[in-house]
Image (tube, rainbow, N blue to C red):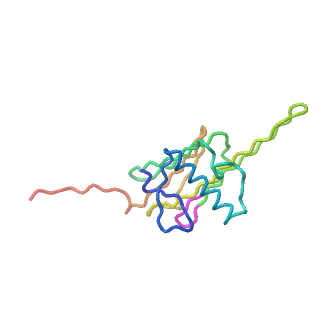
Amino acid sequence: MFNKLTHWKQKSGDLKARHEDHPLSRLRHDFDDLMHRFLEDDSDLTLNWGGSRMLGSRIEMDDNQDEYVLRAELPGFESGDFDVHISGNVLTMRAKHSEQKKEGNGGYHRFESFHETFTLPQGVMTEQIDARYHSGVLEIHLPKSEECQAKRIDVKAE
């Protein structure tokens, strides 16, 4: 499932899917992301541990007959908080949400952000990508071109 969707890394020629089930893999990715943004992209630095990826967010991709479906569990956002865009075959998902509340002499300020970038598989029809947010899940439909859809090949007897 994840071998068709890879995280984009600017300096690497080999793109590999990330396996987040192992705690050390997650820690390494979070540290790499933080260092990358610190050293190369100071325009979007946030001080959230885990890069700007929300801890506990989960991303998965299904490979269906005619499309890929990317799902990210991102509770606490509104649909207007998201910025999803594509450049070539690179899909970027960002979300930012800020909430401030005064209560008597005190109050609180809450800030959440999310940022992930993926290299899409060949054959995605980028002009027909559809994104929706419902019940804390961002769902992105990535239609496959006709030539990339799986086709059954009949085997004939001789």
Name the residue located 24 percent from the left edge and 57 percent from the top edge.
Answer: 153
Can you give x and y, in whole percent of width and height, for residue 126 in the image? 52, 61
Can you give x and y, in whole percent of width and height, for residue 125 in the image? 48, 61
Q: Nearer the viewer, residue 24 or 43?
A: 24
Which image quadrant is residue 135 in?
top right
Asked if the stretch drawn in magenta spans residue 89, the answer is yes
User: Which region of the structure is painted magenta?
Assistant: 86-92
Name the residue located 14 percent from the left edge and 57 percent from the top edge.
Answer: 156
User: Looking at the picture, does residue 109 appear above or below residue 129?
Assistant: above
User: Looking at the picture, does residue 91 appear above or below residue 72?
Assistant: below
> Is 43 on the left or on the right of 102, as rendered?
left
Asked if the stretch drawn in magenta spans residue 82, the answer is no
Can you give x and y, in whole percent of width and height, for residue 94 in the image? 64, 53
Q: Nearer the viewer, residue 154 or 74?
A: 74
Name the residue located 55 percent from the left edge and 52 percent from the top edge.
Answer: 130
Can you give x and y, in whole percent of width and height, for residue 24 in the image? 53, 48
Q: What residue occupies the far right of the structure in this picture?
A: 105
Q: Nearer the viewer, residue 138 or 119?
A: 119
Which image quadrant is residue 99 in?
top right
Name the residue located 65 percent from the left edge and 54 percent from the top edge.
Answer: 83
User: Looking at the picture, does residue 107 appear above or below residue 90?
Assistant: above
Q: Quadrant of the C terminus?
A: bottom left
Q: Nearer the viewer, residue 91 or 2?
A: 2
Question: Number of numbered discs present?
Answer: 0
